[in-house]
Amino acid sequence: MKNAALPSQTPFGLCRLIGQIRGEIVLGIERALNEEGVDLNFSQFLALKRLGEDGAMAPGELARVLNYSPGALTRLLDKLEQMGYLQRVPDPADRRALRLELTASGREIHARILACGNAAAERAFSKITRNERLQLHGLLVRVLDHMHGERERLAGS
């Protein structure tokens, strides 16, 4: 394997490996989208995926979920709106605010991109067994839970 990852000697080495895996998954998803004739990049994929799964939300909510700055999110939303996949609509609870929701085209493309994402993930994890996937999932959830707890602890002090 080109640039094969060496066994991690440090926790940061594990972080690097996780980052490399994420990068390969991003490339796999973009490749799957391209093969299906879907002209979206990974950021656009993520925004549509979240809106399709979580429903309408405020732009600030989506920015937090995607870890985007307001300016970067505005450019992303403008492009998705121009493509006809999402619309900004008045918030029924606060007429000064806007909510983001998928259009009919956005809901249709959501189903297609989920299939692309699932196919790419299946290829990525095809060499490990179901039990290994469950074990990996459990370990990663423990790490994430610990990190969330640390963040909350630091925010409270």
Image (cartoon, rainbow, N blue to C red):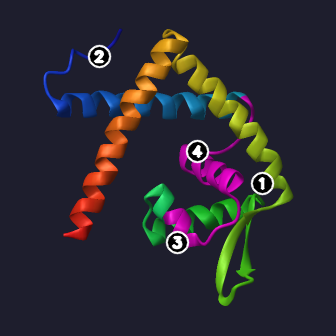
Residue beneath disc 2 = 3
Label 1, label 2: how far apart the Cα atoms are: 38 Å
**Count of numbered marks:** 4
**Image spot of residue 70 (x, y percent):** 47, 71
Residue 95 position (above or below residue 2): below
- Upstream in the sequence, badge 1 or badge 2? 2
Residue beneath disc 3 = 60
Q: Residue furthest left?
A: 9
Looking at the image, residue 2 sits to the left or right of residue 22; the answer is: left
Looking at the image, residue 136 sits to the left or right of residue 8; the answer is: right
Label 3, label 2: how far apart the Cα atoms are: 38 Å
- Upstream in the sequence, badge 3 or badge 1? 3
Please say if the residues under marks 3 and 2 sit with CB atoms less than 8 Å apart: no
- Upstream in the sequence, badge 3 or badge 2? 2
**Image spot of residue 3 (x, y percent):** 29, 16
Q: In which quarter of the image is the N terminus?
A: top left
In the rendered structure, which segment of residues is drawn in magenta? 36-63
Label 3, label 1: how far apart the Cα atoms are: 20 Å
Label 1: few (<14), some or many (≥20) within 10 Å? many
- Upstream in the sequence, badge 3 or badge 4? 4
Q: What residue is drawn where x is 42% and y is 33%?
A: 22
**Image spot of residue 128 (x, y percent):** 48, 11
| Viewer-proximal residue among 120 and 54 | 54
| Viewer-proximal residue among 141 and 83 | 141
Q: In which quarter of the image is the C terminus?
A: bottom left
The amino acid type, in three-letter code, at marker 3 is Gly
